[in-house]
Amino acid sequence: MARMRRYLITGLLVWLPLGVTVLVVKLLVDMMDQTLLLLPEAYRPENLLGFNIPGLGVVLSVLVVLFTGVVMAHFFGQQLLAAWEAILNRIPLVRSIYASVKQLSETLLSTGGQSFRKVLLIEYPRRGLWTLAFQTGTTVGEAQAKTGEEVISVYVPTTPNPTSGFFIMVPRKDTVELDMSVDEGLKMIISMGVVVPKWQGDKAAAAAAVAETPLKK
């Protein structure tokens, strides 16, 4: 029975990650295939070819985004975007949503930005308890001045769903910057600490421990 259980666990370790990966990829492909509905019905692949080809929506989405980037990178595109934003800014509810999403996108996707570039260790929700957090910014305006300390903005994700969490401002002196990447930090959070990223300091600590161990005669 012990051997049978070991075989079952080994099989699950092979098929479970593979199955979840396939399901997630299929979900994303199916969602992006919905972009084909933007085409006129007569020009849709299933009508032209007589059958549906999964994944064409992904190709169409990439081409649309790429073409948009090419157009907007030029002067005419920038003028067109400015006119479009001027129209959106006249609509009360749409104006707030669009401005917030645009500012968030520019912050996250900017190559020189500081959002989600560092993994921090902070004491939360109380002293003595440590958790992972992601640095989202270093400029907090009025809060920076009125606290009298150098505070930074961090995002504390929940586990196993890191898309929900808490925004807090923490004094920089109370944070510990980790060497792990953001991807490694997310893996650790999603796995609830089961998956621990490798650390180069482990080798250094082991070498130091061996060096300090007295030789036996």
Image: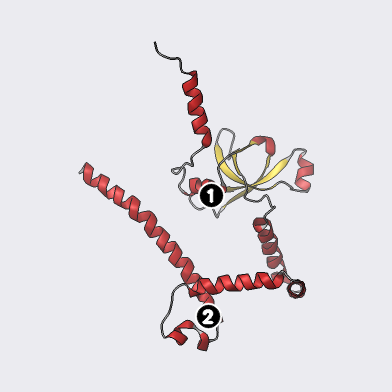
Residue at image coords 52%, 72%:
59
In percent of width and height, residue 212 lies at 49, 19
Residue 89 visible: no
Mark 1: few/some/many CA within 10 Å (<14, 14-19, 20+): few
Could you tell me residue 49's position as x and y percent?
Answer: 44, 85
Colouring used for the render: secondary structure
The residue under label 2 is which amino acid type?
Leu
- Nearer the N terminus, badge 1 or badge 2? 2
Q: Residue furthest top?
A: 217
Kind of residue at badge 1: Asp
210 and 99: which one is in front? Answer: 210
Q: Nearer the viewer, residue 102 or 72?
A: 72
Say which residue appears at 69% left-offset and 52% top-offset.
113
Residue position marked by numbered label 2 in the rendering = 37
Q: Which residue is mark 1?
A: 183
* Residue 163 visible from this viewpoint: yes
Q: Reply above or below: 14 against 73.
A: above
Along the line of sight, the residue nearer the viewer: 199 or 31? 199
* Figure quadrant of the N terminus: top left
